[in-house]
Each structure stands twice: as C-alpha cells, then as structure tokens.
Image (cartoon, rainbow, N blue to C red):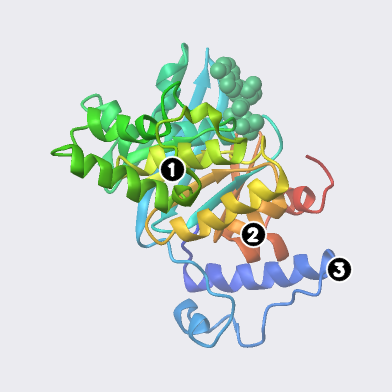
Amino acid sequence: MSTSEEHSPAQEAALVNEQARRAAQAGLNLKPSSRMAASVPAEQRLAVGTAPAVSVEDAVFSCRDVSVLYAGKSALSNVTINIARKQVLAVIGPSGCGKSTFLRCLNRMNDTIAGARVTGSILLEGRDILAKEQDVAQLRAEVGMVFQKPNPFPKSIFENVAYGPRIHGLARGSAELDDIVCTSLRRAGLWDEVKDRLHRPGTSLSGGQQQRLCIARTIAVQPEVILMDEPCSALDPIATARIEDLMDELRASYTIVIVTHSMQQAARVSQRTAYFHLGELIEVGETNRVFTNPRQKLTEDYISGRFG
Ligand code: ADP
C-alpha cells in the first residue's frame, strides 16, 4: 500500500481521478473541484482556493521504513511519514494497530520496553535519533510526552514544573526558574487557577487541571515536539474541550502528535491525520481530505464506522 505524500504531476492526475471515483462509489458529494484539473500543477491548484494541502516540506520529523518488533512479533511495519512543523498530526486507527508504538518511536520510549526492537530511520531536524550516540534524556526534553492518565509527580504544583528545567540546567537562578514555571503554567492555561496555591500538591488538582499541569511540565523544558497519547480519554467533556483549545494555541509554538481513538477529536484538533491499520500506515494527508475523501478503502471503512 502506498503512503507516499509527494507526487509527480502524472501521479497527482491519477489521484484526482481516483478520488472522484471513490467519492462517487461512496455516494459522497465530494467531487474534486473542476478547478483541480489534473493538468494544473499542485501549487497552482492551492493558489485558486481549493482545500489547502498542508506542506510537509518543512518537516520536523522524517521517518523512513520504521518497523517495530516486540519479542520478534511485528507491531509496526515500514512506516514512512514526514511530520510538519507547528501543526497537529492526529494518529488514528483501530485498537492495536500500532498508534502508541509509533508515538513511542518518536522519543525512544520503546527503549524502555524489554524485547522491543526499532529499525528504520527517524530524523529529528535531520538528526538520526535512533543513533547510539543520541542522548535519550535530552531527546525526551526535545520531544515531550503527555500520557493518557495525568501523572503529576508527588510534589507541589511548582515543583512539578520546576523539576525539568532544574535537572536540564535551564535556569540560572531562582528568579529565572520562577519565570519558567509561571510562563509554562500560563502557556498551559493553568496559571490563573493555581497561582495562589503553587505549593499545594499537584495531585490536589482536578483531572483536567492535572493534565494541563503535565502539559506545563512538558513545555517547561522547551520542547520542539509534544506527543500526546490519548490525553483526554480520562477527562470529562469540559476538561477535554479545554485541552483541545489549548492544543490549538500550542501549535503556534510546538509541533504536536496526538494519538486519539476519537475521530471527532482528530477532526477538531488536527491539520493532518494519519490512519494506521494492523501496524501499517495506510494513509496520511490533510485532515479534511482524509475524512471527506479518503484515498484508501481501509481508511474509508474505518471513518465510516465499518470497523474499529
Ligand atoms: P494502539 O496504540 O493502536 O492500540 P499499540 O501500539 O499499543 O496499538 O500496539 C500495537 C501492537 O503491539 C499490538 O498487537 C500490541 O498487542 C503490541 N504491543 C504493544 N505494546 C506491547 C508491549 N509492551 N509488549 C508486547 N507487545 C506490545
């Protein structure tokens, strides 16, 4: 199955025709615009106001043929994808299809799983993060992770955020550390709620606040990328909406990759969506396009609820 994102004009023409065929087959009223004539180069098509394809030329991550085995059993197979800077990429697919495994490749969290073997190439800003000489602690500061269940340290709100900058030597003194903590909590949309109780335990906060505290903790070490593994699955709808709004603000400064089982959430928060199935990346593209005009039958079956 081809997951290539960059196409020659001839491939683009074939894709446009294929999209029209699929749309007709699915009974969807999603015919490509007549302005998307196959002979018109992609750049010009974007200029005349069709749905903007999101460029991946400015990729933060370039993953090529990434495969993962757990104790010899394949969990991810030859995944090739670029992740665009300062956008949200949603990773969707049925349970067990390798979403979390893929996410964990991006900051080498699979290293912590005995028997896991990652092959292929993962470049972060052109640097091979699978290389032996990669400092994994440094990588996890650059590529932070927010988990499904909020997991504040058993420390104060202040210390939860100050911990990372302190161990990474990011503050020259206590005033600078205070400043980092304050800025991180502000960016995570939590400052107003906690500014009068910074020395109370992080665990005294509500679930949604704890998740925003974990986001503040991630931001505090100046990451380039934030990975989120179903960050709202333990939260109520109001707390979920706050996190989703926050993601929209954060993407001005960070690249975000979110694993979500909710297609609605993927559609709300992301600019690009990647669909995985049985360890393979089936399709990746602009979120609107993937949801309204999938190029692959497997994607179409999933988003139309035929399985999952
Ligand atoms: P998803 O996030 O899409 O639900 P996962 O990445 O968790 O999928 O899992 C992909 C496959 O890898 C599944 O078959 C799962 O059972 C297997 N797997 C995941 N984590 C481990 C692990 N720690 N040890 C062994 N197998 C695992």
Looking at the rendered image, the quarter that the C terminus falls into is top right
Q: Determine the CA span between mark 1 and mark 3.
A: 56 Å
Query: Neighbour class for label 1 at 10 Å: few (<14), some, many (≥20)?
Result: few
Q: Position of residue 272 (x, y in %)?
A: 55, 58
Q: Please, what is the three-letter code of the amino acid marked with disc 2?
A: Arg
Q: Position of residue 117 (x, y in %)?
A: 44, 20
| Residue occupied by mark 1 | 196
Q: Is residue 93 above or below residue 49?
A: above
| Residue occupied by mark 3 | 27
What is the secondary structure assignment of the residue under circle 1? loop
How many marks do you count on the picture?
Answer: 3
The residue located at (31%, 29%) in the rendering is 163
The residue located at (54%, 83%) in the rendering is 39
Judged from the image, the quadrant occupied by ligand 1 is top right
Residue 4 in sight from this viewpoint = no
Query: Neighbour class for label 2 at 10 Å: few (<14), some, many (≥20)?
Result: some
Residue 207 in sight from this viewpoint = yes
Lower sequence index among marks 2 and 3:
3
